[in-house]
C-alpha cells in the first residue's frame, strides 16, 4: 500500500490524497478549486500514464471548499473515473429543513463558514468569495454527474445509523475502517450550524448601511473586524465555528506492518461546537483503540484545535513515527506555530513532512518491510512557520493566489518556449486612438510589434473601405479552403468515415481541401495553412476538433500589462477575470499578417467524437430567416434592442429567463435565428442559466433537451460565458502534456445544435462580459450588435463574425476609460468569439 499526499500549491489549506494497493486505488478529497491542472499533473506522475484515472473509491471527508475543490471538474470532464463514492452528505452543512436545495443557499452567508481568508488581499478575497459562493452548486452537480454515470453513491450519515461493514469488506485489501463521526455528532454539528447561520443573518441585517460598504469584500472584512466581533450575536456564533470540520469522515487504512490515520479536518483537540465535547471524546477513544498508527496526517492542517500535546504524546507512545501536514505555502497560520513548537520539542521521536515545503509526500513500506516517508523536494523535519504573505509592492499586487495556482505550469516563460505549446502572449498599451500590441510567439519566432488603428470613421462605424475587405463570393462554397488532418481523423473515424467527409467537400463547387501532413502545434499548423491561401480564397473552414486541428491557447496579456491589470483590480476592487485572460482562439488560421486581426474569416466544424455530428454540420443548409428565438437575463436589458435587429419573417418575441425557465425534456422552437444572453458554465455545457430577481438565485433557462432534433440552417449567437467552449479544459488550464477532451452532442448545447444541422453557433471560449444598462454600448454588446446587423444584410455567419470583430476593433475601448483593465476586457471580448459549424 502507498499513500500520497498531493502538493497543494500556494493557496491556504487544501487536502488531496491518493492511496494505492496493487491495481486498486482510493481518492480522498480534491484540493482547491484552482488545483485542476496541478492535480492532473501529479496523478500523471503517480500513475505514470495519461488519464483518465480510475479510482475504485472516492471519499469526500466534509463540505469545505479546500476539500471539495476541483472534483466537480475532474469528474465532469471525465479526467477521473469513479467506481464507488462515499461522500459527506451536503445536507449537514447546507440544509435548513430536510433535503438540500443548492439554489436556496444564500451565497455570501455561506461563504462566511469557509476557513477564514481575512489575510488575503482584496483581489484574492474577491476570487475566494466567487469560488466559495458556488460551492454547493458545484458539489450538487458532481453528485448528479456521478449518479448519472451510475456510480454507487453513499452519502455519509454517520456511524450508529448506517453500517459501513459492506464497504469495509469490499476494501479489505486497504484495511479500510470508518471510525466516525457518529450520526449523533453530525446532528449536533448540523443544529449548531443552522443556529449560527440564523444568528449571522441577524447580525448582517443589523449592520447599518454606509457608503463605505461597496462590495462583498468590504462586508467580509467588516464582519471579521475586531469591533464587530464584540457583537453578542457573532460571539455566540463563533462558539460553533468548528461545526463543518467536525463533520469530517475519519478513516483508518492498513495492511500487515503498516497502518495510517486520515482524519480530514476533525478538531480532536478543540471541537469549537457547543455540546460536542462528549461526542468528540468518544470519537477520540474509538480512534485510539483502532491504533496504533505508523503514519498520521495531522487533522485540520496542523491546527491547535486539531492536535494538542496530550493527543500527540499518546500517539508517540503507541509507536507513531511518521507525521505529515497538508496545506498551501501561502499560509502563515498553518502549520500553527504552537503546534510546530511542541512537535519540534519531540522531533527525535518521529519524522515530519509537509506538502507546503516538501511537495508530494509518499508513505509506504520499503524493501525491508519498514514504513518510510519519501518527499519530492527539500528535507523533512522543517518546523519553521510559513512567512507572512505580505505584499512587497503595493503598487503592483500579486495575481490572485487561486488563479496563480490554477495556471501553475501553464503560462510558458518567453525564455523557455516548448515546441509543443501554441500559447501566445500579447502586450497591450493604449494611447489616444491607438492600441499597440507587442506579441511574442512561444515557438521563439521573436517579438512582433504592430498597431491597430482605432481612428473613428463614419461616426464610429467601420468605414466602407474596411467593409469591402471580405472577399466577394462567386457561389456559396467558391473560394473556401477546407483544412483537415486526415491521418488523425482516420484514427478516430476509420477510413470509411473520412471518405464520407472528403466526398462531401469534393461535391462543394469551388471548394478546396488541404490535408495537413503533420501533427504539430497550432502555430506551425496555421503557418502551413497560410501557404495554401490563394488570391481567390475567401474563408477557411477547419474540419475536426482541437485534438485534430489544435486551437490557439492565447494569452492576451504579457507580464507588463498583466501587472497593470492586477494593479487596477486591486485598487478598484474588481473581480479577476475567471480565465486569467487566456482563451482558445482559431483566428490565427486566418491571420496571415500576425497582427491578431485575421485577414480571412475562420470557422470550425468540430467532430464531437462522432462522425454523424461532423457530417451533419458539414452538410448544413444556408441560414434561413424564417424564425427567430431568444432568451435573456433580466439583468441584461440591452439584449432587447439586439433582438430587434435579428432577421426573421415569423412573429416571435424575446423570452425573459425568469419567466421562460427551462422546458424540462421538451424540445422548443429554438431554431432559425437564435439568441441567448444567459449565464454559462465552463464545467456544465448542458445548460444556460437565468436569474430570478433575488441575489444568488439561478434557474435553468435552456437545457440540452430543449435543442430541436432538427434545425437545418439555424444560426445561434450565444452571449453566455464559455458558450462556445467545445473542449475541456478551459484555455488557462491547458497543459500540452494532457490531451484535451472534446464535448459531444450528448453533453453540450453547442454540439447538439451542430448535430441537428445548425449552420453556425457563435459563442465565447471564455467568460463573457456585457454591460448591465440598456444604454451602455461596450464589452460584448457591440459584438452582438454588429454580428446580427451584418447577418441581416445577407452576410454568411463566418463573414458576419469576421466583420463584427473588425468593427469592434475600430471602436475599442467603446467610450470607456482608457485603462489597462478595460482595454484587456475589450480585447478579450473581441478575440474569444468563435464561429463553430460550416458558417457559410
Image (tube, rainbow, N blue to C red):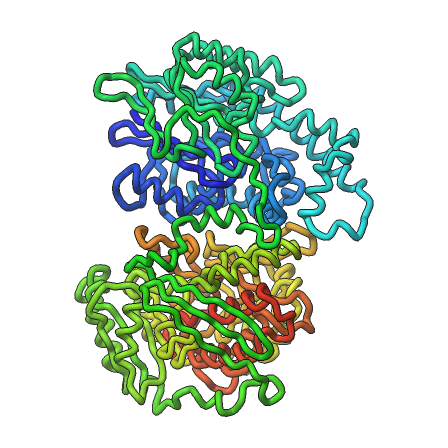
Quadrant of the snapshot with the N terminus: top left
Which residue: 50% across, 31% down?
88
Which residue: 79% across, 42% down?
207
Residue 132: image x %, image y %? 57, 43
Quadrant of the snapshot with the C terminus: bottom left
Q: Is residue 682 above or below residue 306?
A: below
Choose between 221 and 111: the one closer to the eye: 221
Choose between 635 and 319: the one closer to the eye: 319
Residue 109 occupies quadrant: top right
Residue ranking furthest to the top: 317
Residue ranking furthest to the front: 392
Q: Is residue 61 above or below residue 161?
A: below
Residue 214 vs residue 625: left or right? right
Residue 75: image x %, image y %? 41, 44
Residue 511 occupies quadrant: bottom left
Which residue: 33% across, 56% down?
416
Residue 672 appears in the picture as rendered: yes
Residue 545 appears in the picture as rendered: no
Amino acid at each position: 500500500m502507498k499513500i500520497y499526499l498531493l502538493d497543494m500549491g500556494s493557496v491556504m489549506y487544501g487536502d488531496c490524497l491518493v492511496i494505492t494497493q496493487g491495481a486498486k486505488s482510493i481518492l480522498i478529497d480534491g484540493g482547491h478549486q484552482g488545483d485542476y491542472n496541478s492535480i492532473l499533473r501529479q496523478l500523471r506522475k503517480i500513475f505514470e500514464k495519461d488519464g483518465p484515472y480510475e479510482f475504485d473509491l472516492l471519499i469526500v471527508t466534509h463540505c469545505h471548499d479546500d476539500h471539495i475543490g476541483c472534483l466537480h471538474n475532474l469528474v465532469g470532464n471525465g479526467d477521473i473515473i469513479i467506481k464507488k463514492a462515499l461522500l459527506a452528505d451536503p445536507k449537514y452543512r447546507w440544509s435548513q429543513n430536510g433535503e438540500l436545495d443548492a439554489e436556496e443557499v444564500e451565497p455570501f452567508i455561506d461563504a462566511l463558514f469557509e476557513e477564514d481568508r481575512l489575510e488575503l488581499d482584496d483581489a484574492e478575497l474577491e476570487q475566494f468569495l466567487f469560488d466559495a459562493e458556488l460551492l454547493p452548486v458545484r458539489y450538487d452537480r458532481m453528485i448528479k454527474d456521478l449518479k448519472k454515470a451510475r456510480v454507487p453513491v453513499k452519502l455519509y450519515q454517520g456511524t450508529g445509523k448506517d453500517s459501513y461493514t459492506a464497504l469495509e469488506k469490499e476494501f479489505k485489501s486497504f484495511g479500510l475502517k470508518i471510525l466516525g463521526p457518529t450520526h449523533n455528532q453530525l446532528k449536533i454539528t448540523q443544529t449548531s450550524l443552522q443556529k449560527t447561520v440564523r444568528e449571522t443573518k441577524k447580525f448582517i441585517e443589523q449592520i447599518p448601511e454606509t457608503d463605505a460598504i461597496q462590495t462583498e469584500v468590504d462586508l467580509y472584512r467588516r464582519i471579521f473586524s475586531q469591533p464587530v466581533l464584540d457583537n453578542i450575536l457573532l460571539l455566540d456564533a463563533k462558539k460553533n465555528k468548528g461545526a463543518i470540520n467536525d463533520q469530517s469522515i475519519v478513516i483508518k487504512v492498513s495492511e500487515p506492518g503498516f497502518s495510517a490515520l486520515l482524519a480530514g479536518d476533525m478538531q480532536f483537540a478543540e471541537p469549537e461546537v457547543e455540546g460536542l465535547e462528549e461526542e468528540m471524546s468518544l470519537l477520540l477513544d474509538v480512534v485510539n483503540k483502532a491504533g496504533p498508527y505508523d503514519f498520521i496526517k495531522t487533522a485540520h492542517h496542523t491546527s491547535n484545535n486539531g492536535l494538542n500535546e496530550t493527543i500527540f504524546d499518546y500517539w508517540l507512545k503507541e509507536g507513531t513515527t511518521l507525521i505529515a501536514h497538508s496545506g498551501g505555502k501561502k499560509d502563515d497560520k498553518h502549520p500553527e506555530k504552537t503546534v510546530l513548537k511542541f512537535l519540534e520539542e519531540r522531533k527525535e521521536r518521529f519524522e515530519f513532512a509537509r506538502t507546503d515545503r516538501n511537495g508530494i509526500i509518499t508513505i509506504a513500506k520499503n524493501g525491508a518491510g519498514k514504513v518510510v516517508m519519501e518527499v519530492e523536494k527539500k528535507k523533512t523535519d522543517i518546523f519553521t512557520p510559513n512567512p507572512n504573505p505580505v505584499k512587497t509592492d503595493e503598487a503592483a499586487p500579486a495575481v490572485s493566489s487561486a488563479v496563480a495556482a490554477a495556471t501553475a505550469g501553464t503560462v510558458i516563460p518567453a525564455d523557455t518556449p516548448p515546441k509543443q505549446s501554441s500559447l501566445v502572449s500579447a502586450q497591450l498599451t493604449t494611447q489616444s486612438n491607438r492600441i499597440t500590441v507587442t506579441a511574442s510567439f512561444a515557438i521563439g519566432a521573436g517579438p512582433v510589434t504592430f498597431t491597430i488603428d482605432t481612428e473613428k470613421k463614419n461616426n464610429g462605424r467601420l468605414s466602407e473601405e474596411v467593409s469591402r475587405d471580405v472577399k466577394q463570393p462567386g457561389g456559396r462554397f467558391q473560394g473556401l479552403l477546407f483544412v483537415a488532418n486526415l491521418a488523425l481523423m482516420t484514427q478516430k473515424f476509420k477510413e470509411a468515415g473520412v471518405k464520407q467527409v472528403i466526398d462531401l467537400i469534393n461535391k462543394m463547387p469551388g471548394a478546396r481541401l488541404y490535408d495537413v501532413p503533420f501533427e504539430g502545434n497550432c502555430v506551425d499548423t496555421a503557418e502551413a495553412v497560410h501557404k495554401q491561401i490563394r488570391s481567390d480564397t475567401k474563408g477557411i473552414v477547419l474540419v475536426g476538433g482541437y485534438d485534430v486541428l489544435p486551437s490557439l491557447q492565447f494569452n492576451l496579456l504579457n507580464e507588463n500589462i498583466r501587472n497593470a491589470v492586477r494593479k487596477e483590480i486591486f485598487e478598484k476592487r474588481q473581480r479577476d477575470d475567471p480565465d486569467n485572460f487566456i482563451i482558445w482562439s482559431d483566428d490565427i488560421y486566418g491571420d496571415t499578417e500576425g497582427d491578431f486581426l485575421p485577414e480571412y474569416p475562420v470557422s470550425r466544424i468540430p467532430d464531437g467524437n462522432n462522425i454523424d455530428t461532423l457530417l451533419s454540420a458539414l452538410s448544413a443548409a444556408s441560414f434561413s430567416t424564417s424564425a427567430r428565438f431568444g432568451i435573456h437575463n433580466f439583468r441584461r436589458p440591452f439584449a432587447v434592442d439586439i433582438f430587434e435587429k435579428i432577421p426573421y419573417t415569423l412573429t416571435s418575441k424575446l423570452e425573459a429567463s425568469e419567466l421562460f425557465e427551462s422546458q424540462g425534456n421538451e424540445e422548443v422552437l429554438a431554431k432559425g435565428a437564435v439568441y441567448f444572453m444567459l449565464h454559462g458554465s465552463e464545467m456544465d455545457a448542458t445548460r444556460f442559466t437565468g436569474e430570478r430577481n433575488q441575489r444568488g438565485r439561478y434557474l435553468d433557462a435552456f437545457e440540452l433537451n430543449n435543442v430541436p432534433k432538427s434545425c437545418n440552417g439555424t444560426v445561434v449567437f450565444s452571449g453566455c460565458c464559455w458558450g462556445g467552449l467545445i473542449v475541456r479544459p478551459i484555455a488557462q488550464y491547458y497543459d500540452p502534456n494532457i490531451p484535451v477532451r472534446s464535448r459531444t452532442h450528448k453533453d453540450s448545447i453547442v454540439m447538439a445544435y451542430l448535430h441537428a444541422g445548425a449552420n453556425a453557433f457563435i459563442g465565447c471560449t471564455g467568460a463573457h462580459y456585457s454591460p448591465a444598462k440598456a444604454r451602455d454600448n461596450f464589452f460584448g454588446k457591440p459584438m452582438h450588435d454588429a454580428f446580427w446587423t451584418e447577418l441581416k444584410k445577407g452576410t454568411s455567419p463566418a463573414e458576419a463574425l469576421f466583420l463584427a470583430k473588425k468593427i469592434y476593433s475600430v471602436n475599442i475601448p467603446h467610450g470607456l476609460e482608457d485603462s489597462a483593465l478595460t482595454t484587456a476586457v475589450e480585447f478579450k471580448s473581441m478575440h474569444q468569439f468563435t464561429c463553430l459549424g460550416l458558417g457559410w
